[in-house]
Image (cartoon, rainbow, N blue to C red):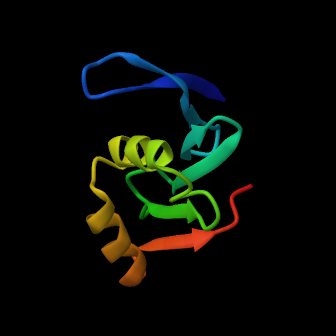
């Protein structure tokens, strides 16, 4: 497992916002003690990646949403559309 700080759009480390890689080719965005996003099969190009958002915390606050958007490289409108279209899956990640 590897953990590093998330970087903001100016290239600075962000306190309490983390990117986590596990040994199963998954990538996570963690805000404080909560997992917000899980990207399954992030590294394995032979498998399709699936993206999960924590149903309770993915839109918890303006700050969480801001850094979630940086992590996913999308805006809130795009993320909400992908949830509605079933591309992103809401689930309990905590």
Occupied quadrant, residue 28: top right
Seen from the viewer's position, the closer of residues 43 and 37 is 37
Query: Would residue 57 appear left or right of 46 to someone viewing this image?
Result: right
Query: Would residue 17 appear left or right of 86 to someone viewing this image?
Result: right
Q: How many marks?
A: 0
Most extreme residue toward the front, as rendered? 62
Can you say which quadrant of the picture contains the C terminus?
Answer: bottom right
Can you say which quadrant of the picture contains the N terminus?
Answer: top right
Most extreme residue toward the right, as rendered? 94
* Image coordinates for residue 21, horizontal then vertical, percent: 57, 35
Seen from the viewer's position, the closer of residues 72 and 14 is 14
Q: Is residue 6 above or below residue 92?
A: above
Q: Is residue 51 above or below residue 24?
A: below
Seen from the viewer's position, the closer of residues 78 and 60 is 60
Q: Residue at x 47, y 64 (%)?
A: 50
* Image coordinates for residue 30, horizontal then vertical, percent: 59, 40
Query: Would residue 6 appear left or right of 60 to someone viewing this image?
Result: left
Q: Residue at x 27, y 66 (%)?
A: 78
Occupied quadrant, residue 77: bottom left
Seen from the viewer's position, the closer of residues 43 and 11 is 11
Most extreme residue toward the top, as rendered? 12
* Image coordinates for residue 73, horizontal then vertical, percent: 28, 47
Q: Is residue 83 above or below residue 70?
A: below
């Amino acid at each position: 497992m590897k953990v590093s700080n998330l970087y903001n759009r100016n290239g600075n480390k962000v306190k309490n916002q983390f990117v986590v890689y596990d040994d199963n080719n998954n990538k996570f965005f963690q805000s404080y003690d909560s997992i917000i996003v899980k990207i399954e099969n992030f590294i394995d190009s032979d498998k399709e990646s699936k993206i999960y958002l924590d149903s309770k915390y993915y839109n918890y606050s303006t700050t969480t949403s801001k850094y979630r958007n940086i992590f996913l490289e999308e805006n809130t409108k795009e993320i909400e559309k992908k949830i509605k279209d079933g591309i992103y899956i809401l689930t309990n990640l905590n």
